[in-house]
Image (spheres, rainbow, N blue to C red):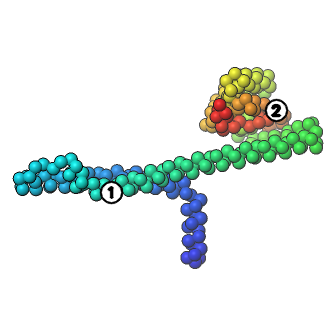
Amino acid sequence: MGLAEIWRNTQRLAQENKSVLLTAVGVAGTVSTAVLTGRASFKAAEMIIEGENNRIDEHQEPASRKEMIKLVWPLYIPPVGVGIITIGAIITANRMDAQKAAALAAAYGISERSFQEYREKVVERLGESKELALRDEIAQDRVNRDPVQNKQVIITGNGDVLCKDNISGRYFQSSVETIRRAENTVNHDIIHHMYASLSSFYEHIGLPPTRHSDEVGWNTNNLLEVTFSTTMSTDDRPCIVLDYAVGPKQDYANLY
């Protein structure tokens, strides 16, 4: 591998990991600023004491505050310079992370719209019944790939039908009536409070929240619409798979 190729690879890695590198610079700069400031302060104290002793020996008046500052200010140039670089690195890293988040959100929105258009076209070409059958087949494949025997089934106390949530991948016992009631309750909250989180829906069907369920939800632009697919679990039990006509969005609460 030649030097030119090594240089190109180094540039590519640096470009791909800009945010991480800038964060590392920010951390290192914070520590360096503290260390340099401490050293400068000790050195400044020594210089001031030495200067005052010389003035006493020469029977001069004590130095004024302005004279002291003029004496020691060059010592603080390195920590101030490192501090400015540190602040710039932290701000730039945060800005880049925000831009990445915005880009991911935009990509997610485009992907979701594309999927919705694809689904509408499938319904248009095949009809609703065939589209539903196709959706059931996909749900069955997911259940087969994620056997219930390998999972803990959550007992909610709201029914005894085996269900599977497509977002969290959790199996639980409930009923269609309970889930529909929860859907109506969440949509009532959305209409009156402008938005509701996925955690709110989980709470109404008896499931604990997940790490990310508070961060996503629905608003008045798109209400919660639960869809059901009928499958058989890998231990030969009827299993209802929950999906969502419109998935919960990360910026659901920012509409207002």
**Relative to the observer, which residue lies in front, 121 or 70?**
70
> Residue flagged by tag 1: what amino acid is it?
Ile
Q: Residue 140 lies in what quarter of the image?
A: top right
The x, y position of residue 87, in whole percent, is 44, 50
Q: Residue 222 lies in what quarter of the image?
A: top right
Q: Is residue 207 left or right of residue 78?
A: right
Q: Residue at x 56, y 67 (%)?
A: 10
Secondary structure category for the residue under label 1: helix
Identify residue for label 1: 77
Q: Residue at x 34, y 54 (%)?
A: 79
Q: Distance from label 2 to label 1 (Cα)?
A: 67 Å
The x, y position of residue 239, in whole percent, is 80, 33
Label 2 or label 1, whichever comes before in sequence order: 1
Q: Is residue 156 visible?
A: no
The x, y position of residue 177, in whole percent, is 79, 22
**Label 1 crowd bin: few (<14), some (14–19), many (20+), radius 10 Å:** some
Q: Is residue 30 left or right of residue 200?
A: left
The x, y position of residue 234, in whole percent, is 79, 39
Q: Residue 180 lies in what quarter of the image?
A: top right
Q: Which mark is residue 43?
A: none
Residue lying at the far bottom in this picture: please name it. 2
Q: Residue at x 90, y 40 (%)?
A: 123
Q: Is residue 50 visible?
A: yes
Establish if 39 lies above or below 243. below
Question: In which quadrant will I find the C terminus?
Answer: top right
Q: Are marks 2 and 1 in contact (CB under 8 Å)?
A: no
